Image: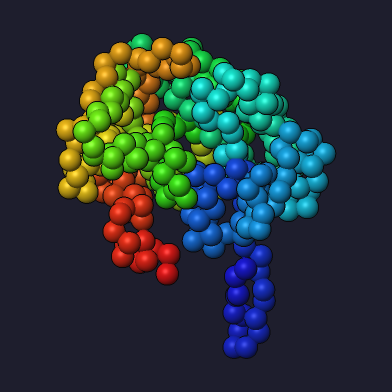
Amino acid sequence: NIICHIGDSDEVLLQGPRVLVTGATGLLGRAVCKEFQSNGWMVTGTGFRRARPRFLRCDLTDEDAVRRLLQEYKPDVIVHCAAERRPDVMEQHADAAVSLNVHATSTVSKEAAVCGALLIYISTDYVFDGRNPPYGEDDCPNPLNLYGRSKLEGERETLRLCPGAVILRVPVLFGEVESVTESAVTSLWQKVQEATEESYPLDHCLQRFPTDTRDVATVCGSGIWSGCLLDDPSIRGIFHFSGKEQMTKYEMAVAMAQAFNLPSNHLIPLTEQPAGSAPRPINSQLNCSRLELLNLSVEPQAFSTAITECLWPFTADKRWRQTVFH
């Protein structure tokens, strides 16, 4: 809420703009909530299994529940972060994952159009096959796995049911994690720390562009929403945002070790994709010039700086832990 002073003594309580964040318990959702809160928004976050006590519990696959939620809170903006984003899990639990990534997205899109909210749908670089990077927003998608196909279908449903929506494609994310296993990037920290005689092979084949959720959140809030305030019709449709440093998982792990002055000779580069996992694009680099040309992007922090900020609460130095949690 915002207090507005009128004249010498009268005060009028004004309602700030309202944003609804789905998947608010997740890595990106938490960062998006924090960004909008810091800019004076009234933030409503939803989750499911981990929702209470901080957020509302809402089953996004329940159309009536989603309709009631939007009718009650009447958001000006919806940032749809909720998704099953683990490719290997999707292959094993396809029906449930598609229900969330596609059907729930259809419901949110339809209800966003009804209530007149700006919808920002978070998608992925995995809609591309990785054979001809970098990829612009208008390049033809060709996902290699079920995760990519489900997110592409979610994009299509979003634009079909809510034509004024924004699609924001992002690559692999890291950020202020509650557990290092929460991100495919920060999960590498476990192997970095275990500097024993045993060697750890890490992928040195797939090219990634690790991206900080705090930067993505800034793009959603200060970037896209600020642009929409200008009533610019070009600020609709598909956008790309990405970190700028190209790294394999092996290179990320070595960078973490260097940032914390730890040995890395136990980390072994693996130049073949492991058998049995969902296929992934070899290099799905995103061309982000559309956001940049509209002046809606942000300059990402260097990976070594950002990952240090995210990981230092999980170092062995208990004094650092106390600094964070007390």
Farthest-out residue, front: 197
The colour style of the image is rainbow
Q: Position of residue 39 (x, y in %)?
A: 50, 60
**In the rendered view of the protein, which quadrant contains the N terminus?**
bottom right
Residue in the picture at 45% in, 47% down: 179
Q: Nearer the viewer, residue 209 or 160?
A: 209
Q: On the rendered structure, is 175 left or right of 319?
A: right
Q: Is residue 204 visible to the viewer in this orientation of the structure? A: no
Q: Position of residue 89 (x, y in %)?
A: 55, 25
Q: On the rendered structure, is 294 left or right of 13?
A: left
Locate residue 100: give its quadrant.
top right
Locate residue 130: give its quadrant.
top left
**In the rendered view of the protein, which quadrant contains the C terminus?**
bottom left
Numbered disc total? 0
Residue in the picture at 19% in, 45% down: 262
Q: On the rendered structure, is 3 left or right of 308?
A: right
Residue in the picture at 71% in, 48% down: 57
Farthest-out residue, bottom: 8
Q: Position of residue 53 (x, y in %)?
A: 66, 58
Q: Nearer the viewer, residue 258 or 125?
A: 258
Residue in the picture at 73% in, 53% down: 73
Q: Nearer the viewer, residue 13 or 57?
A: 57
